[in-house]
Amino acid sequence: MKGDFAMCGIVGYIGEENATPFLLDGLSRLEYRGYDSAGIAVYDGQKIVVEKTAGRLEALKQKLEHNPPAGHAGVGHTRWATHGRPSDRNSHPHSSCDGKFIVVHNGIIENYLELKEALLSEGYTFTSETDTEVVAQLMQKHYTGDLLGTVRKVLAIIEGSYSLVFMSAYQPDRLICTKKDNPLVIGLGERANYIASDIPAIIAKTRRTYILSDGETAIVTKDSVRIENSKGEPIDKKEFVVTWNAQAAEKGGYEHFMIKEIYDQPKAVRDTLSGRIGKDGHSVVFEELSWTAREMEKIRKIFIVACGTAYHAGMVGKHYIEQLTRVPVETDIASEFRYRAPIVGSDCLLIVVSQSGETSDTLAALKEAKRLGAQTLAITNVVDSSIAREAGKALYTYAGPEIAVASTKAYTTQIMVLLLLAVYMAQLSGSTQERRLKEIVAEIKCMPERIHKLLEDVDPIKVFAQQYAASEDVFFIGRLLDYAVALEGSLKLKEISYIHAEAYAAGELKHGTLALIVAGTPVIALATQEEVYEKTLSNIKEVKARDALVIGIAMENDANIEKYVDHAVYIPHTDKYLAPVLAVIPLQLLAYYAALSRGCNVDMPRNLAKSVTVE
Ligand code: AGP
């Protein structure tokens, strides 16, 4: 069986207070990363006490209720198993045979099996199937009295991707942490310092952080943080001050993160647009890009590569870039891209889209495209994320932390950046469509308000969601940009309500799927794209002729659609290019309220995790 590795949440504390409360609170703020077991390890003054269990964090809290470990240094971990069942013994933290070394880990040690066999032959015993335990044993094997030196020695032996935090009873006044391809953040406190996989775990304690880069190692004590590069040379790390307030990472009064983030969209789009439209009011400016017209001319082909919702945003971006710049664009699902021998060269631009900036499939595709010589650009929501750092350039969405597993505000802000980028590229290459570009930019500026207006009245959607929540199958249809949005609507409904849904190019129905349409089958038809409106109407008639139940999504000035559908949901009138940003919102809400009606765990749907850092 392939190594039992996990994608998880990590926390660490070293300071003058008791570590345990921070460890448990920090882990609970990382719940969205998906987990099925949890554990903590605390140095109690004599030894390291490890407490861990399968199940939700609650199970661990109950286990600790009467006799929680106490001490000034500790680490915690929540695990989302991808290989091997969740179990107590596979939970982290993992310790060496002699109990003197503790490790928590996110990622995979590729060569753990051969290392484990060698350790077994030398008499080491193991209690778990995980790759992480091998790291703890290696610490014991190679310890020479210098903890940092031992960590470096072990890092030279292991191969793979990881964020690791080490603790030792030999030197309990420090934690050592390092990362490669997985995130790790250090929080700078008063008489204490913090470590975490993600900012929400520490935001209640401090906003001053160091975001570790690949190969960097941090030696963290209660009153110092020293960061070294892979050669052991000290680094003068730039502090990253988190501007999100504590509420931003909490639910802010909403019942779920997902509905909060749906309603965050006016602000998320506004923040993403800020500073990106020039003083003249119509030119797009990206301070992160310093492309010249000459460099633009050299780009013969563009790839947009991503996963899930980000891929659907990429499909929208393809239309924008092709129609405004006439440069051919291929969209690829990241896990397919690098295995299909893509035809990529130095005249290509690869754009990766990723909310988390940590998706392994997308990171791997990015590295492959770089290897093939392409220029690369990341569109991501997380500053200094692995993907942001790996790409040649990064354009950020400023959606703020997206905690719900189902991506909403990340999608709409990704689309905004892709449209800004298309306009920027068109303006740079001296496009003759100057008036058209000005029209688009004028409408881009109105989007926060249009989204806000759309969100003022969601009751009809709530009613439809409750009506259709018991459906077995739902179909989403549309053409061109509406088809790209239909795909996203279908994913939203599937992943949080568990209703089977499929999206189809509306013109494709008659080539097979129409056989599935029977009386009462719910069909969501998007009809916002003027140039194919009549064609879409005829597809609506096709399904109505089979007595489907049709919800039409159209622009508010459309006086025609309601003659053909059972229910019409209107979005504010906007430019056809901006329609996806608005049309997706009723679909997000439909999924949310359908999931509520079905009693699903909206923010943490079964089997899924927020950031998929495994392949
Ligand atoms: C979206 O609702 C899903 N949670 C999932 O498809 C997600 O979009 C995908 O895993 C990509 O994540 P990323 O944007 O962080 O790379």
Image (cartoon, rainbow, N blue to C red):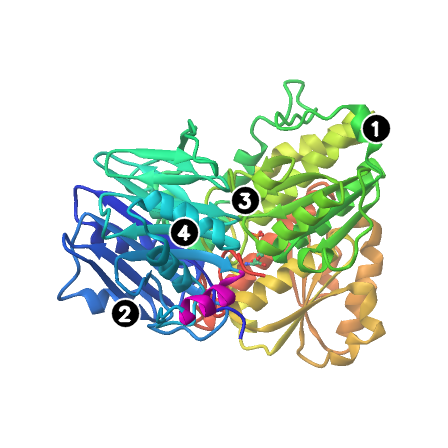
Q: Nearer the viewer, residue 200 or 246?
A: 200
From mark 1 to mark 3, how far is it between C-alphas?
Answer: 34 Å
Residue beneath the point at 13% across and 66% down: 66
Mark sitting earlier along the chain (1/2): 2
Q: Which is in the foreground here, disc 4 or disc 2?
A: 4
Residue tagged by mark 1?
A: 431
Query: What's the mark number on residue 59?
Result: 2
Residue 164 circle label: 4
Mark 4 and mark 2 in contact? Answer it, CB < 8 Å: no
Percent across and percent down for residue 196 are 37, 47
Q: Which-is-in-front pick, marks 3 and 4? A: 4
Mark 2 crowd level (few <14, some 14–19, many ≥20, 10 Å Cα)? some
For numbered disc 1, what is the local secondary structure? loop
Q: Give the residue pinned by disc 3.
A: 386
Query: Going by the image, does 154 lie left or right of 409?
Result: left
Q: Secondary structure at mark 2?
A: helix
**Residue 612, how many percent across, how many down?**
53, 58
The type of residue carrying mark 1 is Ser
Camera-near label (4 vs 1) is 4
Mark 4, secondary structure of its residue:
strand
Looking at the image, which residue is at 77% across and 59% down? Answer: 340
Q: Earlier in the sequence, mark 2 or mark 3?
A: 2
Magenta-tinted stretch: 110-121
